[in-house]
Image: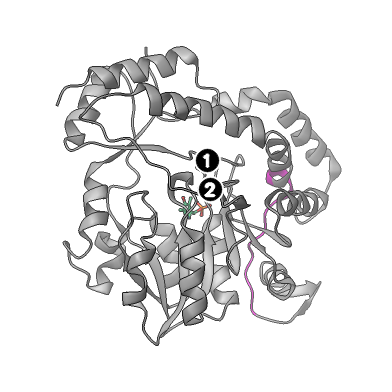
């Protein structure tokens, strides 16, 4: 049996006729940018999260850099972020000319809040919290530190649509929550998309203006903005998917519950969940000391895996200018060398799950 790391086509088939109908509706409507679908999606997504406002944007990266820009963060400012995140989180900071200050992750792969305070300087303006792989971060602790030092909090929720901390959805804790609707995300479109959510009406208004060349009235441009709009077709698809998000989420949870209970191999370390947090399983990430051997073994069994992420941002070519040497973040670097994401997708068949579990259990290091 062949099992791929991800199969987006399976997810399409679950609600195929609804997607097709939506596509035709938008196509026939004659309105393709900033119309009814975007406005309705923004309202529905804000309501789903329990956020005051949602503004649709062109991508998750746009949501991040526009968030920092709206908070007035730029050159000479520092933003705290975990060292093991996807590089887009860091780009959201550096596009504005600000400097990322990396923090080691905890054993849940999220920001280790206990290590934040020692890195705060007079230049620190914000904390970027990434709810990595779909698990909510320790928001109680992080908000306490932010409050004590007068820091803004931005949440990168590109992987955590619907994840809870203390019963409250990620994206609604900080000043701004940033979402991506890239196709592989838990709430994914069939193209690029993103959004900002906030409880601050003024920020929402400014983002709304900024995404559309800085104008809230056609040809009256108040600021130099960007073109970063979620389009009608993607918003329409997202509305269809959002209606089904509960069952999509339950399916991922069932698969990962099986992985947690049925994978039993001393060579494999399974993920852990923080008390008070929920996990929406964007990825099921295991650790293995001899990862290369495991990848190779699974390949011979025709099971595909993925690494999220093999190179931490501070060691990437793009961030050599920061001058951070290998060895500076041993926990994050160790994760980069040992994490492995095993197959997980909506529409994953029971036989596929059985096969992945059986093969991993037979692996010998
Ligand atoms: C996907 C992702 C982004 C970027 O989103 P895009 O829509 O691809 O621009 C940012 N941060 C994290 C953690 C992501 O997983």
- Residue at 85 percent across and 43 percent down: it is 29
Percent across and percent down for residue 363 are: 21, 21
**Of 359 and 180, which appears nearest the observer?**
359
Q: Would you name the residue on which mark 2 appears?
A: 160
Q: Residues within 10 Å of mark 1 (few under 14, many from 20)?
A: many
- Residue at 52 percent across and 76 percent down: it is 147
- Residue 186: quadrant of the picture: top right
**Of 293 and 217, which appears nearest the observer?**
293
**Of 279 and 348, which appears nearest the observer?**
279
Q: Secondary structure at mark 2?
A: loop
Outermost residue on the front side: it is 275
- Residue at 33 percent across and 35 percent down: it is 270
- Residue at 20 percent across and 30 percent down: it is 267
Q: Quadrant of the N terminus?
A: top left
Percent across and percent down for residue 124 are: 42, 81
Residue 227 lies in magenta, yes or no? Answer: yes
Q: Secondary structure at mark 1?
A: loop
**Of 186 and 194, which appears nearest the observer?**
186
- Which residues lie in the magenta part? 224-234
Query: Would you place residue 222 above or below residue 325 in this image?
Result: below
Left or right? Give the position of 52 relative to 108.
right
Q: Residues within 10 Å of mark 2 (few under 14, many from 20)?
A: many
Percent across and percent down for residue 276 are: 51, 49
Q: Would you name the residue on which mark 1 appears?
A: 280
Count of numbered circles in the view: 2
- Residue 110: quadrant of the picture: bottom left
Residue 92 lies in magenta, yes or no? Answer: no
Magenta residues, dominant SS class: loop
């Amino acid at each position: 049996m062949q099992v791929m790391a991800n199969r987006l086509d399976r997810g399409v088939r679950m609600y195929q006729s609804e997607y097709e109908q939506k596509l035709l509706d938008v196509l026939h409507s004659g309105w393709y940018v900033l119309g009814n679908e975007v406005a309705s999606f923004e309202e529905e997504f804000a309501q789903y999260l329990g956020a005051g406002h949602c503004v649709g944007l062109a991508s998750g990266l746009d949501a991040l850099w526009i968030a920092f820009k709206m908070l007035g963060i730029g050159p000479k400012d520092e933003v705290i972020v975990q060292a093991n995140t996807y590089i887009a989180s860091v780009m959201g900071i550096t596009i504005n000319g600000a400097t990322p200050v990396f923090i080691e992750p905890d054993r849940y792969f999220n920001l280790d809040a206990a290590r934040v305070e020692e890195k705060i300087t007079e230049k620190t303006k914000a904390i970027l919290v990434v709810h990595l792989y779909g698990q909510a971060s320790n928001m109680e602790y992080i908000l306490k530190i932010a409050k004590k030092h007068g820091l803004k909090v931005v949440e990168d929720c590109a992987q955590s649509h619907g994840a809870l901390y203390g019963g409250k959805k990620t994206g609604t804790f900080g000043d701004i929550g940033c979402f991506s609707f890239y196709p592989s995300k838990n709430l994914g479109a069939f193209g690029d998309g993103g959004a900002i959510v906030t409880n601050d009406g003024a920020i929402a208004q400014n983002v709304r203006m900024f995404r559309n060349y800085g104008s809230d009235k056609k040809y009256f441009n108040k600021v130099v903005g960007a073109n970063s709009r979620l389009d009608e077709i993607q918003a329409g698809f997202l509305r269809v998917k959002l209606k089904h998000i509960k069952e999509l989420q339950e399916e991922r949870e069932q698969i990962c519950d099986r992985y947690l209970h049925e994978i039993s191999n001393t060579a494999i370390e399974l993920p852990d969940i923080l008390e008070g947090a929920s996990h929406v399983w964007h990825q099921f990430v295991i650790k293995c000391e001899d990862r290369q051997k495991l990848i190779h073994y699974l390949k011979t069994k025709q099971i595909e895996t993925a690494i999220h992420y093999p190179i931490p941002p501070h060691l990437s070519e793009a961030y050599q200018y920061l001058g951070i040497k290998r060895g500076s973040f041993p926990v994050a670097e160790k994760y980069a060398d040992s994490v492995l994401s095993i197959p997980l997708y909506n529409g994953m068949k029971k036989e596929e799950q059985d096969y992945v579990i059986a093969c991993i259990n037979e692996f010998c290091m």
